[in-house]
Each structure stands twice: as structure tokens, then as C-alpha cells.
Image: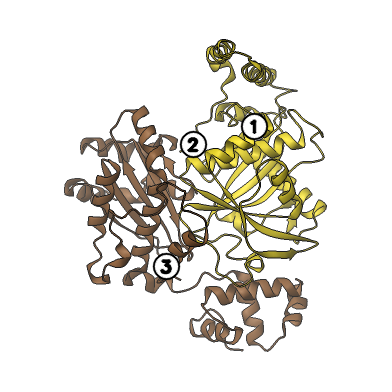
Chain colours: A brown, B yellow
Amino acid sequence: MVTNGLTLLSLDWRTLRMNKLPGAYLDHDLFDLGALPRASNDYLGFLFSVREKFGLDDVAYAGMNPINGSIFGHVTYGDAWKTHYVQMGLHRIDPTLLKARRSIAPVDWSRLERDDDFRKVFNDASDFGISDQGLTIPVRGPFGDVGGLSVTSSLSRPEWNKLKANVIVGLQSVAVHMHDMVIRSDSLSNLLKTPNLSQREVEVLQWISAGKAQQDIADILTISYRTVEVHLRSARHKLYALTTAQAVGRAIAMGLIYPG
Amino acid sequence: MIIVIDALNKHKYPKLLDEMFKLRARVFGDRLGWEVNIVDGRERDQFDDLDPAYVIGLDDLGNVVACVRALQTTGPHMLSDVFSAILDGEPPIRSATIWESTRFCVDTKRLARGQGRNTVSYATCELMLGSLEYAQASGITDIITVIDPMMDRVLKRSNNAPYDYVGKVADMGKVPALAALLDCTDERITRLRNFAGIYHDVFIAEDEIAAAESYESFGTVNGAARVSADLEKYCDDQISESATEKEKHAALRLKAALADRIRSRSDMRA
């Protein structure tokens, strides 16, 4: 799924009647990271082209590793701010990362509470000439991976609101594109290859591995036969397995369940 | 009146969320007979733990009378998981600009029949408007919504028919469910507004909603908020009933002059 993320994305657009919609896809003048050979993925170049195209001050992407909580990013900010940000450990308190990512909608920073963390980050930021007027677009991936694309602007508030309305659809696509490309890069995707199985899915697979039939599992878990089927189907999907036997094999190989 | 509650502001509205989970239990468990998990009279599932956004409709007394839940289709969501039967083995739609909406419901017991405020029809249209406008302001172009055939008929009747369906009709407990597609366009929003006769901003200011959270209801305890709602309705009626441009202009000016007493705007939009 991760390696196919981009293919799926473009297929979706074809199956839906998107031809009348404005700015819904990546425009041609933004280059497609997926089309580049993996070794030369130029994340920063991509972000600069986004900044240029949408008329923004700065563009930053941050992805979060759900397993150890580490944050990695690509930003158009100057080196001085980058160094300061990392040295001060601001990523551990930055509400534009930590709070905004829990929204499903883009979060205008005016919505974030002006608490100690916010002031700490943005008092420092203003010393580096960075605006506290901005927007974070949260991204969620299928494996519990999360990311966010943040943009800043020093336009007047009314002009900023106007710009936002014009670019928000495009920025949504850019954010997910960037996220998928970073996640599919080697270092992180190795960690993310462990599928995000629910407790029930693991239980169902475990009982199958122990030789139980679906109706038996339904009785054991006091759920319907159909619900067992639903969990099983989902587990197969998450394990990229075509058959239940294949799913059980993979789950054992990954240490998600014990051999029966 | 519509409020959007998500992970960023939910700590402010525990009572509204609790009422919403109770409404969902009554609708999906009791009335529709879906196979849902109800504990202590509240219906919750694992997707409620994934920081979804809830679009919630309140009546004029501040009661939760309608709600729907939204998730991004790029991450875990119902159609990629427990509703996969609807997709009949096909991979779920995954797109940066499509949200999934689930658990759309309206309190048919508390609300009256017929037309006008505090009716089932009004609350349904208002919630759909709130959902479409919230999505649109977030850069979302389409909503894929999991609904039952009755809600499908309601959508069609409200001049808000889905433009397409995905997958097949699948059994979810006693009743079937299906996945429908709605575009978040100005055209659809206008059609719906014209059908419902709703021309004001449906979102409520967060400070006003704090009243609904703190007190039993606007009507019995916080008279000022009730007056504010009535005042707003009066202004909106004046605007919608104005016969000439001049009348309309005057009505709009009146509403603007009373803006700080009405406070009907929301800062929920991105």
C-alpha cells in the first residue's frame, strides 16, 4: 500500500468525476516526487516549488514516526532558525506539530491556544523573522503514520484568508503527496511495514492459526459470523494477503501472532 | 446551530460529546438496530479514539439533536476497515481531498415534524450544510458517506442527492448500509440552502456554545443566549423576507449592527 500510495491516489481521481473540480490534483508545474528515482528525491526542491507557486513565506513538512515518536522534517526556513529550533528542542513542544496533527482539518494557527508552548516557539520564531500567521495541514497515513505540512504568510489577515481559500485544495494534495513520498522512503517504511492490526483482528487470526473455523471463532468471541468475516477481511487487507492462509503466514512471520 | 468539535477543542465540551454518544446509541442501537457497541447508553467505536471531527447540531435550547463524524480517507477510516463489506473486496478510496462521514443521525424523538426551526427536516439540512461547509473550507472536494437507505431517501428529498455510490449495499445488522458520494460545491450548498430556507451562517460562536456546555439549556438557565438566538432568527427572517434590495440592505444592516449581541459566527473554519 505504501509503495502504491501514489497510484491509488491517481486512480481515485479517475474513478470519481473530477474533471470539473479546480486545483484538486497536483498541477503540472509542481514536479511529481513519485516520478523521480528514489535516490534523488528532492524534498526540499519540492517544498520551494510549492512556496513559489502558492505565494507563501515558508513551507515545512514534518513526519512523525508512530513507533518511537521521533520527528523528521524538510523545511524552507533558513539555517539559523533550523539550528536554533533543533538545539532548543522546540519540536517537542511545537503546537503547530503536536496539536495541529490531531485535527482532521487544516488548522489555522489562530485557532491554537496562546499557551506557554506556543509563546516559547513563536517568541523565538519572531526573532528569526518568522510569522506566527500560518496553517498546518494534518496528514494521516494508513499505518498510524502522521505528518503535517505547515505554511506561513506575512500577508495582512484579510489577504491571508483570501489566499488560503484559493490554495487550500491544492495544499491538501501537496501535503499528502509529500507525506506519502517521505513515508515510502526506506528508512521509515521499514518501521511502518508492521501493519496496524486491531486487537480483534489479531484475535481472529490467532484462533484461525489454532485451527478454529469462523463459526467457532464467532462463538468464542461472542460476535457474529459476519463480524468475524469483517475482521478477517480487514486483517487480510492490511497484510496485503489475498487469502486467509497467506495472512496467517505473514502475521506469524511478523510476530503479530503465535504459531498455532 | 452547528458546532464542530475535534481533538483541539473537545476538552471544552465534554457534556455535548456525552450527549452525542447517547444520541448515537438511541439511533443506531435502538432505532436502526445496527451491530454497534453500546456501553452505559453510549455508542462508541474504535474510530472515536482516532481524533475524528464531529459536526454537531443543537436545537434552540442547546440540546444535541444531530451529529455526524468525519475522518480523512488517507488514514484509518470505517470504509477501509469495518465497512469494507460495502466495498465488496475493492480497496477503499484514499484521497487527500475526500473525507469519510459516518454516524449521521438526527434525534427524531425530540424534534418536531413539519417545517421551521427545531424540526427533523431543519436539523437534517442544517447538519448537512454544516458538514459540507466545514469540509469545503478545509479544502475537501468530496465526502464519501456511509448511510442507510432511509438517509439516502432523505438526502434525495432535500435536493441533496448523492452523485454516485461506491461498492454495494451491504448488511449491517438489521438494516443495509451503502456508501454515497457528495461533492462539496457551492452549487450543492446553494441547492440545499434554498430547499431548507436557511440563509444565515449555521456555525455558532464558541463562546456562545460554552453556555450550552455549562448550563442545562439556553432556555431555562441562560435567558440571554436564548434572546440572542431569537434575535438572530428575527434578523434572518427579515433578510429572507425582504422584498426589495433596499429592504434587504436595511435588514442586513440591522443584523450587522446587532452582531455583537448575536455572535453567530464561528471561528471553526480553517
**Chain holding disc 3:** A
Query: Label 3: which residue?
Result: A7
Q: Residue B229: percent from the left, percent from the top?
A: 66, 21
Name the residue at 65% across, 84% down.
Answer: A208
Q: Quadrant of residue B58?
A: top right
Q: Are marks 1 and 3 on the same chain?
A: no
Name the residue at 73% across, 72% down.
Answer: A226
Determine whether A43 is above or below A155 in the image: below
Residue type marked 1: Asn
C-alpha distance separating marks 1 and 3: 39 Å
User: How dense is the environment of label 2, judged by Cα within 10 Å: few (below 14), some, or many (20 and up)?
Assistant: some
Kind of element beneath mark 3: helix
Q: Is residue B98 visible?
A: yes
**Chain holding disc 2:** B
Determine whether B79 is above or below B17 in the image: below
User: How dense is the environment of label 3, judged by Cα within 10 Å: few (below 14), some, or many (20 and up)?
Assistant: few
Query: Label 1: which residue?
Result: B194
Query: Label 2: which residue?
Result: B269
Name the residue at 65% across, 77% down.
Answer: A204
Determine whether B100 is above or below A9 in the image: above
Q: Nearer the viewer, mark 1 or mark 3?
A: 1
C-alpha distance separating marks 1 and 2: 22 Å
